[in-house]
Image: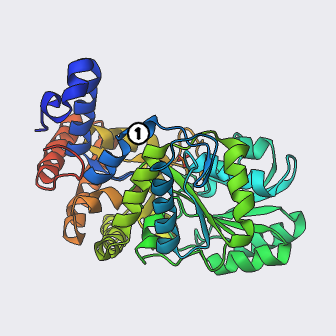
Amino acid sequence: MTADPTTTHPALAATDPELAALVGAEERLQGETLRLIPSENYVSAAVLEAAGTVLQNKYSEGYPGRRYYEGQQVIDQVERLAVGRAKDLFGVDHANVQPYSGSPANLAVYLAFAQPGDTVMGMALPMGGHLTHGWGVSATGTWFRGVQYGVRQDTGLIDFDQVRDLALKERPKVIFCGGTALPRTIDFAAFAEIAEEAGAVLVADIAHIAGLVAGGAHPSPVPYADVVSTTTHKTLRGPRGAMLMCREEHAKAIDKAVFPGLQGGPHNQTTAAIAVALHEAAQPSFQDYARAVVANAQALAEELLARGFDLVSGGTDNHLILMDLTGKDVPGKVAAKALDRAGIVVNYNTVPYDPRKPFDPSGVRIGTPSLTSRGLTTEHMGAVADWIDRGVRAAQKGDEDALALIRAEVAALMAAHPAPGIPA
Ligand SMILES: *Cc1c(COP(=O)(O)O)cnc(C)c1O
C-alpha cells in the first residue's frame, strides 16, 4: 500500500487532486513492480527534494560569475558545488552540468567540434549505440554524415578492426563510444588509439554506466577520452539531466556550445539535485552499490543461461543484459508486454543482426540498477530469473492467469524492499 497523496503531497492534492492521484498511482506502480529497465533507477528522497525547490524560480543564463541576470548570490554557489563535485568524483579538469539531458549534451559536442555535413562516427543503433551517435533519424545523422560501426556476429563484441578501418577511411571529426545496449566493458584505450590515428575527437558517452564508473565498477574513460558525456539519471542515480566533462583545452568550446550555442537558462533545481546525487555517489556506500549492481547482473545472467536463455555476448560485465529470444520462439515485444502484465518492467530491443524489424525485434533488454537500489542481492536473482522464465512461457501460451500469479509474487517481494523516494 502506498500512502494517500493528501498526506504525502498535500499542496498538490489540494490544488490539483487529479494530478495528485496520478502521482500516487505512479508511486504505487514503481513501488509494486520489478523495474528492470537498465536506464532507470530510483533517486533518493534527498535528490527528489532538491529537484522540487524554489531554485527552479531563478533564471541564470551564463556560468557562475558570468551571468546575464542579477540575483545569482546563491545559484552561483549551487552550480559551483555541482561542478566541483563532478570534477572530484570523475577526476576531470572541467565539468559542465547544464545540459538538459543526454541528447542535448551530445548535440552540444557536435556543435563544439563539427560543422554541418562533416563526417561523424558512432555505434549503429541496432548494434547497441544511441540515436545521437549519428543515427539517421536523429538530427545528428541528418545534419552530419554518420558512419557506423557494430559488433561481431560471432562474439557480440565491438569489432575493433572495423572501427579502425572505418575511422581511417572516413576520417570522422568525432568518434563516439558507449551505447545503450552494451553488456560488456568498453575498451576506452582501444578507441583512443584509433581516434588518435584518425585525428578525431573521442567522446565517451557513459550515460548508462556513469554510476559504475563513479563507483569503481567500470574502468574510467577520463584518461582516454577528449570529452565524457553522461546523463545523470541512470546508474548515477540523480535527477534527469546531463553533464559534459573534458580536458581543460576543450572547456571553452564545450561551455560555449551548451550556452549560448544550444540552451538558455539552466534548470537550477536540477543542478542542485545533481549536486546531491554526486555527493551521494562520493560516499563509500556508493561503491558497494555499483559493485552490487554488477554482481546482481552477473548472477541474473547465470540464472537466465541456466534456464536456456541466449544472451548477447554470452553474459554481462556491467548492469545490463540483452536477451535474444529468437530460440524461445517469442518476439521481444510480446515477451515485454507480457512481463509488464506480470509486474516485471522491461523493454523490447533489437539484438545485433536481428532478423526481425526494429519495431518488432527479437530481444529484451534488462538491467539491475533499480532492483539493487531496493536492496535486492544475488540471492534474489534465481527468483527473478524464474519469474522471467515463467513470464516468457506464459507469453508464448497467452496464459494470463500465470502472469497474474507472477505479479502477486513480485509485489510481495517488492513490499519487503521499499523503494527509495517513494512514500510508505
Ligand atoms: C540515455 C542515453 C542518452 C540520452 O539521454 P536522454 O537523457 O534520454 O536524452 C545518450 N546516450 C546514451 C548512450 C544513452 O544511454
On screen, residue 123 above or below 422: below
Within-10-Å neighbours for mark 1: few <14, some 14–19, many 20+: some
Taking 148 as reference, is 30 left or right? left
User: Does residue 364 appear in the picture of this structure?
Assistant: no
Tell me where residue 14 appears, x and y as whole percent. 20, 20
Q: Nearer the viewer, residue 75 or 115?
A: 75
Taking 344 as reference, is 406 left or right? left
Q: Nearer the viewer, residue 403 or 239?
A: 239
- Which image quadrant: the C terminus? top left
User: Does residue 185 appear in the picture of this structure?
Assistant: yes
Tell me which residue sits at (43%, 62%) in the image.
321
On screen, residue 213 above or below 366: below
From the image, tell me which residue sits under label 1.
Answer: 334
Q: How many numbered dots are placed on residues in this image?
A: 1
Tell me where residue 230 appears, x and y as whole percent. 55, 59
The image's colour scheme reads rainbow
Tell me where residue 22 appears, x and y as whole percent. 27, 27
Look at the numbered disc 1 and say if its residue's Cβ is closer than 8 Å to ligand 1: no
User: SS for tag 1?
Assistant: helix
Taking 378 as reference, is 142 left or right? right
- Which image quadrant: the N terminus? top left
Q: Nearer the viewer, residue 401 or 60?
A: 60
Amino acid at circle 1: Val
Q: Quadrant of residue 60?
A: top right
Tell me which residue sits at (82%, 54%) in the image.
114
On screen, residue 332 above or below 246: above
Tell me where residue 157 appears, x and y as whole percent. 60, 71
Tell me which residue sits at (42%, 58%) in the image.
275
Q: Nearer the viewer, residue 389 or 147?
A: 147
Tell me which residue sits at (57%, 54%) in the image.
64
